Each structure stands twice: as C-alpha cells, then as structure tokens.
C-alpha cells in the first residue's frame, strides 16, 4: 500500500471556463495558494478490480473512471483499491477534487513506479481536475500556458499568509465546477470579458505576491472572484452558489478591513468564504467570522506544502 497527502488550494485568480480542445485545459491563466489546514489522505493498493472508497464509503465516480482509463492508455496500471478521505467537507466548494487528484496521482506514481516528475504529476492531475494541477506544489502556484502544468511561483515562507475558512453549509454543491463552467462559457453574456481580463488580473496578482503587497493582492483577488461569480450568476440557468451567510461573511470581511485589518475574501463554486489575511489579523478575522450568523464552523490554515508520499 502507498499513501499520499495533498492539500486543497484556493485560487486568487480563478479558473472558470475550459479551452475547446482535449486535455482539460483552462481558458485563462490562474494562480492559487495551498492550504495546510485541510488535507486529503489517499491510500492506493493492489486489488482484484478497481474499487473506490471516499470518506470510508465505497462509491463510483465517472470522472475518476475516465481518468484511470486515460492513465492506463499511457501506463501499465494494475487494478487498484483507492481509499481517499478528506478532513473537510467534500464537494462543497473546498477544492476536494484538487487535493483528491493531486494525492491520487502522487500515490499511483509511487505505487506503480510510473517515474513521473512533479511537472508530469501536475499534468496528470490537471487531466482529472484542472485545479488539481496546482495542488502538486506548495505555497503560491500558477497554472499557465503554454504547458498548462502548474509552476511554483513562491514558497510558502516567501509570505506566510493565513486563511480563515468560514463554512456556511456542508451540503455537496448542486452543479459541479466542470458542468457549471461549461454553462457559463456557453450562456453568460459576460464570459468573453472574463476571459479578456484574466491576463491583466494574473499579472497584477503575480506582481503583488512578488512584492508582498497585501492591499494590491486584496484588490485584484476580490475583484477577480466577484467577476467569476458575476458570470456564474448571469449563466442560464443561473449558478448561484452563495447562501445568506456567505454574503454576511463578505460584508464582515469588508468591515474588518475598514477597521484596519489586512484581510480579503475569495469564494469558489460553493458557499464557503475564504478570508486571506496577514498573521496579525488572523485571530480577529477568525473570531469575527465565527460570530457571523449562519457560520457553522471556522477552519484556520497557514500555507501548505505540495502533494507527497508519506508511507
Ligand atoms: C471555482 O478544477 O474543480 O475552484 O477541471 O472541471 O475539475 P475541473 O474544475 P475544477 O474547477 C475549479 C474552479 C474554481 C476556481 C479555481 O480553483 O481556479
């Protein structure tokens, strides 16, 4: 048996929309930070036939089946038991597919001696779920053309940001990211503007990270997040991932900033709010969000490392 760990990542410049060619390629450059406080643990072992256990329950997952088929088109991979568990809500906008595919390719690579380096692991993780390409690496990570393998931008100690996740629902999302982003591409009247602006947002965020300029990163990350939710909301039928508590948390983050705290929010395809802050503000942010009506739980995290084999 081989075990791998991986962390979810949250995008500060988001991926929402794919290119119209094979390989699960994002339409736009995107970048993320890795979350040490949330972990996927995946065990891979030989088995008479493929079995998939998620959070201790045997399950079937067409995305995983297709991915294994693609992997077996290139490598000799025997039937496997895959037993994967998350210590955070699954399929609820906390990037469980990102850490899931990153942990999985890392474990299979070691278990079956595929001989992949990190860049190749990132490419295979991307085929499963594009955001998973980023979870192969720790710290600040970009997913950019022309290779569309993730690239580490800066180590986590370059800028030890903290993240407070406000969980407002544990329900799995009703429309998954892949289906949702295709709907946005086909129906949102603002999709082309989203794609057009992405390169500028990516450049501004990269520069802010390089210079550790919190206010500039806050401005571009919040705006980029709200642009993505604007194309979600203007998709037909609409994609509305927020709860009233999500909106209350965003308002609270804005008021914390007015009170002088270094904090900004970002939200993915789900109702959870991720408040990214400087360490000096983390206690105040965590206590303010835990007191916000509708918040079920607050998870605190520093920046994490990349996917790795542990046993
Ligand atoms: C909103 O990577 O889950 O979290 O490639 O279809 O599996 P697939 O999509 P996925 O989408 C992530 C969307 C996002 C933004 C992001 O992480 O960049």
Image (cartoon, rainbow, N blue to C red):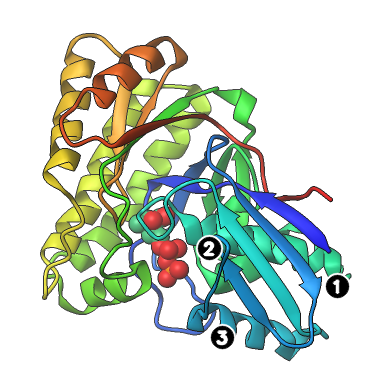
The single residue placed furthest to the front in the displayed view is: 57
Say which quadrant the N terminus sits in.
bottom right
Residue hosting label 1: 112
Q: Nearer the viewer, mark 3 or mark 2?
A: 3
Say whether disc 1 or disc 2 marks the residue closer to the N-terminus.
1
Label 2: few (<14), some (14–19) or many (≥20) C-alpha neighbours in 10 Å: some
Residue 109: % across, % down: 80, 67
Label 1: few (<14), some (14–19) or many (≥20) C-alpha neighbours in 10 Å: some
Q: Is residue 265 left or right of residue 227?
A: right
Identify whether 187 is placed above or below 242: below
Say whether disc 3 or disc 1 marks the residue closer to the N-terminus.
3
Q: Residue at x 19, y 62 (%)?
A: 232
Give how far apart the Cα atoms at labels 3 and 2 are: 24 Å
Circle 3 — which element? helix
Give how far apart the Cα atoms at labels 3 and 1 are: 18 Å
Give how far apart the Cα atoms at labels 1 and 2 are: 29 Å
Q: Mark yes or no: residue 220 visible.
A: no
Residue hosting label 3: 66
Q: Which mark is residue 145?
A: 2
Identify whether 112 is placed above or below 251: below
């Amino acid at each position: 048996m081989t075990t791998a760990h991986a962390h979810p990542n949250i995008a500060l410049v988001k991926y929402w929309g794919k290119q119209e060619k094979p390989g699960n390629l994002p339409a736009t450059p995107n970048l993320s930070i890795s979350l040490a406080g949330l972990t996927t643990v995946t065990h891979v072992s030989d088995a008479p036939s493929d079995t998939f256990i998620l959070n201790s329950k045997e399950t079937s997952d067409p995305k995983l089946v297709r991915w294994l088929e693609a992997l077996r088109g290139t490598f000799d991979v025997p039937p496997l038991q895959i037993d994967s568990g998350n210590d955070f809500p699954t399929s609820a906008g906390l990037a469980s597919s990102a850490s899931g595919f990153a942990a999985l390719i890392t474990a299979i690579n070691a278990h079956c001696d595929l001989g992949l380096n990190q860049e190749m692991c990132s490419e295979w993780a991307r085929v499963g779920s594009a955001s998973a390409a980023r979870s192969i690496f720790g710290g600040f990570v970009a997913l950019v053309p022309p290779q569309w393998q993730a690239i580490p931008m800066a180590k986590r100690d370059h800028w030890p940001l903290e993240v407070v996740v406000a969980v407002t629902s544990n329900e799995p999302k009703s429309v998954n990211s892949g289906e949702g982003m295709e709907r946005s591409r086909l129906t949102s009247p603002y999709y082309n503007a989203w794609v057009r602006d992405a390169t500028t947002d990516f450049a501004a965020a990269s520069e802010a990270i390089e210079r550790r300029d919190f206010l500039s990163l806050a401005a571009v990350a919040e705006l980029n997040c709200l642009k993505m939710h604007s194309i979600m909301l203007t998709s037909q039928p609409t994609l509305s991932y927020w709860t009233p508590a999500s909106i209350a948390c965003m308002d609270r983050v804005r008021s914390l900033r007015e009170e002088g705290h270094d904090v900004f929010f970002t939200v993915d395809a789900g109702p959870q709010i991720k408040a990214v802050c400087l360490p000096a503000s983390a206690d105040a942010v965590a206590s303010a969000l835990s007191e916000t009506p509708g918040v079920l739980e607050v998870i605190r995290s520093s920046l994490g490392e990349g996917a790795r084999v542990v046993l």
